[in-house]
Image (cartoon, coloured by chain):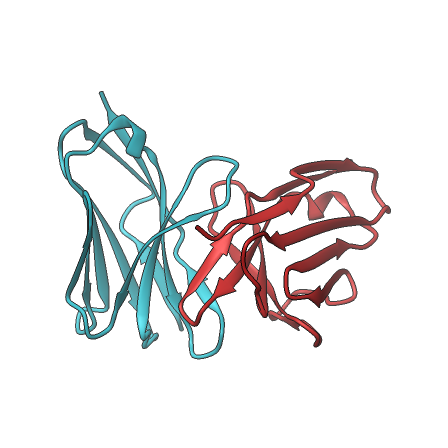
Chain colours: A cyan, B red
Amino acid sequence: SQKIEQNSEALNIQEGKTATLTCNYTNYSPAYLQWYRQDPGRGPVFLLLIRENEKEKRKERLKVTFDTTLKQSLFHITASQPADSATYLCALRTGGQNFVFGPGTRLSVLP
Amino acid sequence: GAVVSQHPSWVICKSGTSVKIECRSLDFQATTMFWYRQFPKQSLMLMATSNEGSKATYEQGVEKDKFLINHASLTLSTLTVTSAHPEDSSFYICSARLGAETQYFGPGTRLLVL
C-alpha cells in the first residue's frame, strides 16, 4: 500500500543546532516532493520543492535532499531558532493533480 | 506572493444546519483548488479537487452530497457542509494551485458543530 512517513511525531533540539527531519515514502513515484511549514491553527506555508532529478536544494538556512533510490527526503534547518518551531509536512504529488501529505513532524527549538 | 483567503476563519453552528466556507485566491487565478480536512495532531486529508466550471472530484469516502463544492469563478471556490453533525467538526483548509507544481493554502476555517 502507499504510505508517507515522517521520522518522528515530535523533535526537540537546542537553539543553534541543525534540525534534520525525514520523509520516507512507499509505492509512490513522485516527480517532485515539497516541504511545508504549518503553525498551530494556520494553513501550511510552502517552503521548498525538489524534483526527482535534483539531489539537493537550498534556501537560506533550509536544505532539502531527495534520494529516489531510498525513497527518502531529508529536510535540514541550520542554525535553528525558536521561531523555527512549527510542524513541518512533506508532500508528494501523485499521478493526477493531487498532493498527498505526510503526518508531519512537530519541531521545538529550545532556547 | 500568492495569497489565498478563507472566510469565515471560525464558525460554530447547531447540528443539522448547513455551513458555507469560501476560498478565494486574491492575486492570481486558480483553475484548480483543493479542499482538505485536518483533525487535531493529524495531517491534511484531501477531500476533493475543485475545478472551475466543472464538477468537483471527490476522494474515496467523502460524501459529495454532504460536502457540496462550487467553483464558479477562477478566484472563488465554496465548500458547503450540509446538515452538519458534531463529527463534522474539524479544521477545513483550502488551497489554490498556481502553475503545475505549487499550491498556496488558505489560513483555514475551524468548524464546531454543537
Q: Percent position (x, y) of residue A106?
A: 35, 39
Residue B33 vs A21, above or below: the answer is below
Residue B18 relative to residue B105: left or right: right
Q: Which residue is depicted at the point 64% across and 53% down?
A: B23
A11, A79: nearer the viewer: A79
Residue B44 relative to residue B57: left or right: left
Residue B43 vs B34, above or below: the answer is above
A9, A75: nearer the viewer: A75
Q: In the rendered picture of this protein, how many numbered marks are placed on residues?
A: 0
**Which corner quadrant of the image does residue A101 belong to?**
bottom left
- Residue furthest top in the image: A111
Q: Percent position (x, y) of residue A27?
A: 34, 75
**Which corner quadrant of the image does residue A85 belong to?**
top left
The quarter in which the C terminus of chain B is drawn is top right
Q: Which residue is depicted at the point 70% across and 46% down?
A: B87
Q: Which residue is depicted at the point 14% across and 29% down?
A: A16
Residue B68 vs B3, above or below: the answer is below
Q: Percent position (x, y) of residue A21?
A: 23, 48
